[in-house]
Amino acid sequence: MSYVDAGHFDPGTVYATFDLHTFGDMRPYAYKSTDYGKTWKSLIAAGSPVRGYAHVIRQDLVNPNLLFLGTEFGLWISLDGGSQWSRYKGGDFPAVAVRDLAIHPRDHDLVIATHGRGIWIIDDITPLRALTPATLAQDVVFVRARPTAQKILAGGGWVNGDASYVGDNSTDAAVITYYLKKRHIFGDMKIEVLDAAGHVVGTVPSTKRRGLSRVTWSMRLPPPKVPPAASAAFGAAYGPRVLPGAYTVKMTKDDKVYTMPLQLVSDPRETHTMADRQAQLALANKLVGMLGDMSFAVERMNGVRSDLEDRASRLPVGDALAQRLRDASSAADVMRKKIVATKEGGMITGEERLRENLTDLYGAVVFYDGRPSQMQIDRTDAIGRELGDIVAAFGAWSTKDLGALNTELGAKKLQPIALISRAQWEGVGKGGQ
């Protein structure tokens, strides 16, 4: 006998594994006793998929029918007290010897000690506890889990040498677990997250395979639209983080809808108040709107420049109108260059325009959950005024110069220059990263 685990529910219940590989027997042996070890019942039936001699068996601390078995070739899970077993393959868990198991009573994580592959942790096994026969009989079930804590934002790190062994931390995202009795084949299927007012705040990529699946939601709103430029805007690749509170996960599977509540809570170490978080989110959303306004303005300028160059190319060489069209394109480009950098290198070349200033400010606000500083608020207003002045100048220029040019284009049977509207721009989804 290599390991004995006392049951947590019924007096006299004991689980045991036997290791006979030294005698050349590689079969798994796992038993259950309900009379303090006087008599035993095998938990590995003939034809069982369990492989490798058994090292350890554990009964869950909450669900008496949930058993975990570690063998020489992996981890096996039973949902029905040992009648049926399935190999655990989540997170690319290898077919490696599992020597010991522990269930964390507070975090509900399963800690796995392997031989040669270090310590593995299955985060939050509460979904496994919910897989009862009644659950498995349903077509679709959302599996409730513990509330999701929004971890304090942090960055940094370093390059480890080949002798350093570091495990991944648990995900910073909200984990959504659901069960499909059958693989979804026909019709649409999507998973959305709604706030308390019923507004969609996130869309979650989903898998349509049968069985238990875990997907994640970043707990962030969609990222802002950023005008294209010569420099990258890494900080604007992420949307603002939503506030702690009650949300709803909604699955639309063909013509049926399934929902589950999702509770987001603050990190226990968090010192910011809800008022601080609300102020941060308000400014982040304002900056998202400003980046959208900026993207729309640049898109209009780019569209006008493209149309002006196109009309000029349709005129004979030496035509006076062609030169005026190209001059107008240059004038529009001058205004565009006040918004975006057109030379690669960013701060190295010294070329930073409103776009670069605004995306840097946005990154500083969106990656800190505390109340924004007065300087950030003032800087937001200042950039907004500068952007407004450029947009107003472009509007006055287009009203005056484009009107005269369109008259001449009409006389030459050429299509006039038309500015794209906000509705058209939002409809085609332009102005992205």
Image (cartoon, rainbow, N blue to C red):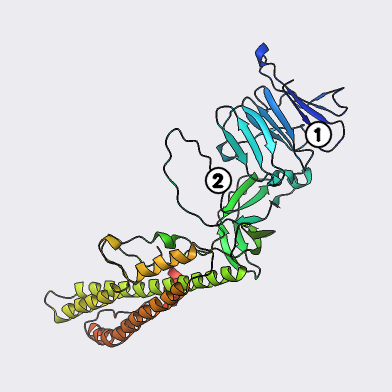
Mark 1: which secondary structure? loop
Q: Amino acid at mark 1?
A: Gly
* Mark 2 Cα-neighbour bin, 10 Å: few <14, some 14–19, many ≥20: few
Q: Quadrant of residue 273?
A: bottom right
Task: Decide if residue 428 is on the left or right side of residue 131.
Answer: left
How far across and down, in percent of the image, does residue 340 sit?
A: 31, 69
Q: Is residue 24 visible?
A: no
Image vertical order of residue 345 relative to residue 290, above or below: above
Disc 1 marks which residue?
7
Quarter placement of the C terminus: bottom left
Q: Amino acid at mark 2?
A: Asn
| C-beta proximity under 8 Å, tags 1 and 2 | no
Task: Kindly identify the residue that appears in the image at 20 percent across and 72 percent down.
Answer: 313
How far across and down, in percent of the image, does residue 123 sit?
A: 63, 44
Sequence-wise first label, 1 or 2: 1
Mark 2: which secondary structure? loop
Residue 398 image label: none
Disc 2 marks which residue?
169
- Closer to the camera in the image, 355 or 308: 355
Q: Quadrant of residue 277?
A: bottom right
Quarter placement of the N terminus: top right
